[in-house]
Image (spheres, grey):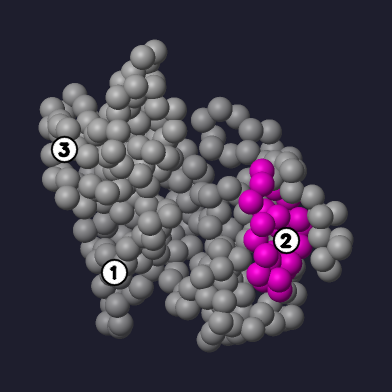
């Protein structure tokens, strides 16, 4: 189950002069989009999310839009498909993925959902090819076209990275059960929660050294910037006592000019050295406030008086 702070997202909205206003809300847990209409010019999508969250668990799957009062009570519901804001997503064929040698696939209908970890991320299990225990993995996917480019870029980058003791291994490409089109990918599951969720661990100096080493290898050996180094993207493999970096959805080739349609953008304001320093500071002090601002406004000089 996704926590309430992450469960809903406003995709877009329509606010004509004089109203009514309609906001299109994504429910990541139910993987659906429902439009919320309110009277007047309501320019606060947070209000629409608040009203929708009260009713989301009671709305049947065939309801695409609700009209609510100023207090959030449902006035009417709409089941006509013309109100459905979910677009059909094009999934590329497997041969267009040009999989590197050794990368395997698994069918989506072989995956058993164990837990919804976050938006477009599930903890899953699937049967082994040969005799052995069930394989546990993390399945990343998308059901909205707005996230297709980023997901495709992340999969292609991650599965081409060399195996590294401090990077969560890429697992398999996931294909649909009908035409074998690529719908997502899996990575190895590392239990114990990320360093933002699980604060019970005493952070070890060796883990910081490992983080510095893996960032050096990404930046200097592979020419890749992770661009989202943070406690939430770090796991600890207790079997090897190693910190593990994951989540490459913001990763990009260093100094590679961004092009429309690639879903890849290198930004110096998101550089990994700054990310490592902020991560160490946040783990030690439990202070996350300095990264609550936009990346271009995050300044390492702000740490001077606190170190």
Q: Foreground residue, 139 or 127? A: 139
Q: Position of residue 277 (x, y in %)?
A: 76, 62
Within the magenta stretch, is there residue 276? yes
Q: Residue furthest front?
A: 71
**Pointer 2 local density, CA inside 10 Å: few below 14, some 14–19, many at least 20:** many
Residue at mark 3: 63
Describe residue 19's horizontal placement relative to residue 276 as left or right.
left
Numbered mark located on residue 80 in the image: none
Describe residue 63's horizontal placement relative to residue 7 as left or right.
left
Q: Position of residue 243 (x, y in %)?
A: 61, 75
**Pointer 3 local density, CA inside 10 Å: few below 14, some 14–19, many at least 20:** some
Task: Give whichever of discs 2 and 3 has the lower sequence position.
Answer: 3
Name the image quarter holding the N terminus: bottom left
Q: Position of residue 233 (x, y in %)?
A: 56, 63
**Pointer 1 local density, CA inside 10 Å: few below 14, some 14–19, many at least 20:** few
- On the image, which quarter does residue 263 sit in? top right
Q: Is residue 33 above or below residue 250?
A: above
The answer, for residue 149, to whether it is visible in the render is yes
- On the image, which quarter does residue 134 sit in? bottom left
Q: Which residues are magenta?
A: 270-294
The rendered magenta stretch, by its main secondary structure, is classed as helix
The answer, for residue 104, to whether it is visible in the render is no
Numbered mark located on residue 278 in the image: 2
Q: Residue at x 66, y 43 (%)?
A: 294
Q: Are marks 3 and 1 in contact (CB under 8 Å)?
A: no
Within the magenta stretch, is there residue 128? no
Residue at mark 1: 114
């Amino acid at each position: 189950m996704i926590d309430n702070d992450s469960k809903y997202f406003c995709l877009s909205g329509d606010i004509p002069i004089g109203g009514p206003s309609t906001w299109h809300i994504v429910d990541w847990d139910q993987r659906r989009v429902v439009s919320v209409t309110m009277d007047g010019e309501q320019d606060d999508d947070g209000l629409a999310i608040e009203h929708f969250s009260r009713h989301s668990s009671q709305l049947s799957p065939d309801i695409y839009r609700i009209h609510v009062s100023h207090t959030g009570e449902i006035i009417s519901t709409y089941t006509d498909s013309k109100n459905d804001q979910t677009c059909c997503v094009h999934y590329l064929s497997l041969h267009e993925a040009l999989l590197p040698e050794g990368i395997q696939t698994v069918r989506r209908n072989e995956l058993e959902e164990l837990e919804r970890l976050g938006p477009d991320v599930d903890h899953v299990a699937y049967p082994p090819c040969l005799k052995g225990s069930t394989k546990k993995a993390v399945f990343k996917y998308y059901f909205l076209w707005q996230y297709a480019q980023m997901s495709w870029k992340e999969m292609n980058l991650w599965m081409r990275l060399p195996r590294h003791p401090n990077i969560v291994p890429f697992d398999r490409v996931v294909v649909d059960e009908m035409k074998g089109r690529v719908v997502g990918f899996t990575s190895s599951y590392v239990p114990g929660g990320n360093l933002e969720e699980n604060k019970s661990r005493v952070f070890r100096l060796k883990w910081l050294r490992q983080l510095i080493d893996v960032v050096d290898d990404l930046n200097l050996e592979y020419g890749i910037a992770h661009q989202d180094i943070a406690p939430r993207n770090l796991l600890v493999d207790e079997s090897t006592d190693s910190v593990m970096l994951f989540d490459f959805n913001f990763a990009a080739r260093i100094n590679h000019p961004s092009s429309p349609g690639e879903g890849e953008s290198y930004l110096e304001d998101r550089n990994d050295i700054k990310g490592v320093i902020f991560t160490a500071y946040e783990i030690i002090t439990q202070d996350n406030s300095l990264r609550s601002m936009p990346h271009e406004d995050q300044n390492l000089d702000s740490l001077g008086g606190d170190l």
